[in-house]
Image (cartoon, coloured by chain):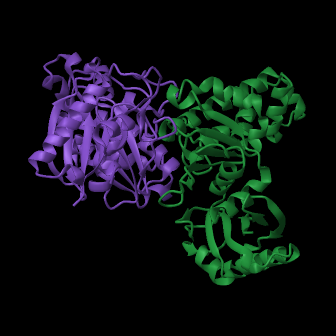
Chain colours: A green, B purple
Amino acid sequence: MRYFAGIDIGGTNSKIGILNEEGDILKSTSIKTLSMEGVDITLERIWGTVKELLNSLEIEEDSLEGIGMGIPGPVIDQKIVAFFANFPWERNINIAEKMEKISGKKTKLDNDVNVIALGEANYGAGKNMKSSVTLALGTGIGGGIYIDGTLISGANGAGGEIGHSKVEKNGKLCGCGQKGCLEAYCSATGIAREAMSRLMINKSNMLYEKIGGDISKVEARDVFDCAKAGDKFSLDIVDYVGDYLALGIGNVLNIINPQGIILAGGVALAGDILIESIKRHLRAYALGVTIDDLEIHLGVLGNNAGIKGASALVK
Amino acid sequence: MRYFAGIDIGGTNSKIGILNEEGDILKSTSIKTLSMEGVDITLERIWGTVKELLNSLEIEEDSLEGIGMGIPGPVIDQKIVAFFANFPWERNINIAEKMEKISGKKTKLDNDVNVIALGEANYGAGKNMKSSVTLALGTGIGGGIYIDGTLISGANGAGGEIGHSKVEKNGKLCGCGQKGCLEAYCSATGIAREAMSRLMINKSNMLYEKIGGDISKVEARDVFDCAKAGDKFSLDIVDYVGDYLALGIGNVLNIINPQGIILAGGVALAGDILIESIKRHLRAYALGVTIDDLEIHLGVLGNNAGIKGASALVK
């Protein structure tokens, strides 16, 4: 039997798992990332945890084929991290080389959202598709593109940054400093901003009641809850979001023409109500030939997508 | 020596060439496509022309390794043409299989603009890049995406349809029936439409004089000629086009993050004046990491891009 380590490095915690060839997680754990201790100590701590997991599974270290890692930042050639989004680590560190030196195991890495996309493509909602684009709809919007077994990671590790494709010329300000990004309209933050703006002038709705009149407290999930309960005001917001998501997804369809779209992350929990809205609007934006056979699914791997996808990097 | 046939099938004429491994065209010719005679007769006539070219070059038929073809329509798996844009031929014909039966030679095909992109990527402006996106800016806007040796042709052959990505939500009507497509703003037709619209209310400019006051006659090339001559009115139109092209290209950069962008086709003949405008606007739309090392070049293969790229399909 061949085994793989899948590691999902996060700003606070890192998830570490041992997986078999089928992508089943045999055992996993979570440790503090503690990036302030420096890159070498962090990688050594992670390798130590991998060895402990192997030990407790009674798997020989020799049976571990490789280590795959998801990283919060752009990754070049599945080796070098251009920069870390939240860590006080240098630019352009060859993490693969460092980890290979520490562990003696083949190591590959990619951006954390790309790795989620690879997980869903290999073991999740996209496992029967030759190509899929996964959108991670959370506080921000990330994306990953999988075509014929390969991630489109980009020349500078920025492949799949669909959240920053523009859905309005000179539109709403985004956290990246640019304007009109998909993320500014359809992330959880974007949805809360839109809801807040509307609640300023309309207080006769279920959503306003739900948040007890404290407009600054509104969250995307409140909007979805009220929409599901039939609140017209909230349904309008969901449709506004679905329309912009359709525009952003439509551009991806026209450019890449994948077999399927996978929606992951917290916002995707809105489920049918959001997917139906996207489908309704998609024909205004994507060429018919790219929609006729298109599959749109919710991600199915949840929090395990990261370590599953990471392990697939070295399979 | 190994030789390859590169064939660029057009609505009226088809170009046919014999090339060596380096992509040099040893000899080429153009014949009428005459698609109304039916697919089999057309393919047989093309194969007959390939044999004549080989003969005149004193190359044995056995030294021909394969046949590559660029097709005006979406191509699936480099074999099947979903539909022909202008031919009275059936849907979903396996042209590769037919041509292999007729010629006995390995045959691959792809969409004509994808094939141009492959030509520029292998032998032209992109030959030193690992990934490039080629935009063919003509009457319409087509695109082709090349990453690490492969074309992104799409699940339904619609990969690279960047001309129909949206640059304005509910914007100008496009020939495809949708609204706000890049093509509606930045194709030669789109540029003429914008010029015409502006000339309706401003006649004190060089462009109006150049076309002798017949607004319906204005063409994109007139706009570029006057802009190059310093006409402020025309320079404004070029900058309007450059801004929208930057938005469309910016979305491609954020989604795919290629190493370079190649501009081909008639509109690209505007040259520096247009490229400078695109570069000036790009930082508003594309993430910095995707622009810092980006190369933007004009295509260099001109009318030979098609047969060169087609031959590369079977190399």
- Residue at 81% x, 75% y: name it: A59
Question: Along the line of sight, which residue is nearer the eye, B202 or B162?
Answer: B162
Residue B78 position, x and y percent, is 42, 41
Residue A225 position, x and y percent, is 84, 32
- Tell me the quarter of the image containing the N terminus of chain A: bottom right
The total of numbered circles placed on residues is: 0
- Residue B217 is left or right of residue B297, and the answer is left
Name, please, the residue furthest toward the left.
B56
- Residue at 57% x, 37% y: name it: A248
Residue A120 position, x and y percent, is 69, 49
Does B215 appear above or below A262? above
Question: Along the line of sight, which residue is nearer the eye, A78 or B82?
Answer: B82
One can see residue B251 in this view: yes
- Residue at 83% x, 27% y: name it: A228
Residue A26 position, x and y percent, is 83, 64
- Tell me the quarter of the image containing the C terminus of chain A: bottom right
Does A35 appear above or below B208? below
